[in-house]
Image (tube, rainbow, N blue to C red):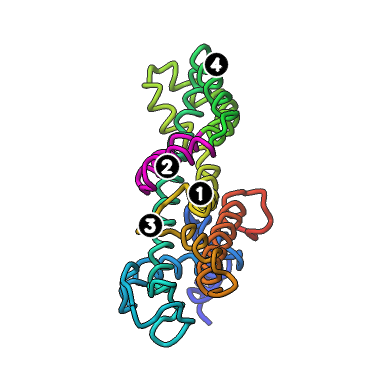
Amino acid sequence: MSNDQIETQTVETATPTTRKRLSRSQLYVKRFFRNKLAVIGLAVFFLLILLSIFGKVISPYDFSELDFMAFNQPPNSQHWFGTNALGQDNFTRTAHGLQRSIIIAVCVSSATTLISAMVGATAAYFGGAYERIVLAIIHFLLVVPTFLILAMLSNSAGGDWRVLIVVMIAIGWMYAARVIWSLSMSIREREYVTASRYMGVNPFVVVWRHMVPNIGSLLVIQFTLGIVGTVMSETGLSFLGFGIKLPDVSLGTLLQEGNATLTTTPWLFYFPAGVLTLLTTSMALIADGLRDALDPSSAAGGQA
């Protein structure tokens, strides 16, 4: 063996194997997909999204269409989830109700997360009289019976789902804002926040670009769990008759209808109840996986 070959072999042997450095987002994704239950929850949620979008497409019936030859029919080849007393197809109604519940949940959770982040972080940043006023408003609204207000306003609007979204946003941001304020109290003392203040940077730019990103993991988890809470709130309102009203349907209205005839036509209750259970469980698993992925001290995400 020549001297050149010996030197080349020595260099190759001495060169350490380099590992590709993962970005922060790639690391979070990798840790998330190590959680098998979270992956299952994500897959179930994706299938439910497909059902809500394409359920009315693959079925030959519209959710409000009447089939006068199929009153209270159990599940069969024509009506996969059966029909109600008016001959309406329960499959398309469940798909439409799921779509309506998801739209409401995503809109409400997105808006409340954004509002609570800005209100809580700005209150912590400015401090003083502004902080005291904001906290006084939050503490006052937290003791107000929000469920009764939500029920009355939604009922007076005739069950319009758009009004329901606005009302749920208006009364749903306070608790999260209180939590975000407490976390932002320590962030406002960081060096980069103090330096930005002395450099004359716009306060809202400091809050949006420096404080809010540092509580991003909390906001992601809050958004995910907010979907679960909103779905349950909307379902409870509609089940009690204060939410969405006919001819529009949501999972809550379907459960209300199915509960009235549970002994005679159980399929009208169990199919929407099963879809609701899958939706809330999948989102809870996703939230648990996100918490472990975004928390560097969690051992559930495995080694980075």
* Image mark for residue 132: 4
Crowding at mark 2 (Cα within 10 Å: few <14, some 14-19, many 20+): many
Task: Give the residue type that dot 2 points to.
Answer: Ser
The residue at the point 52 percent across, 18 percent down is: 131
Residue 224 x %, y %: 51, 51
Task: Give the residue type that dot 1 points to.
Answer: Leu
Q: Is residue 290 magenta?
A: no
* Image mark for residue 237: 1
- Sequence-wise, which precedes: disc 2 or disc 3? 2
Alpha carbons under labels 3 and 1: distance apart: 14 Å
Residue 41 x %, y %: 55, 65
Q: Is residue 97 above or below residue 200?
A: below
Q: Nearer the viewer, mark 2 or mark 4?
A: 2
Task: Give the residue type that dot 4 points to.
Answer: Arg
Tell me the element at label 1: helix
- Sequence-wise, which precedes: disc 2 or disc 4? 4
Alpha carbons under labels 1 and 4: distance apart: 33 Å
The residue at the point 50 percent across, 79 percent down is: 2
Say which residue label 2 marks. Answer: 154
The residue at the point 58 percent across, 30 percent down is: 142
Q: Is residue 16 visible?
A: no
The residue at the point 30 percent across, 79 percent down is: 60
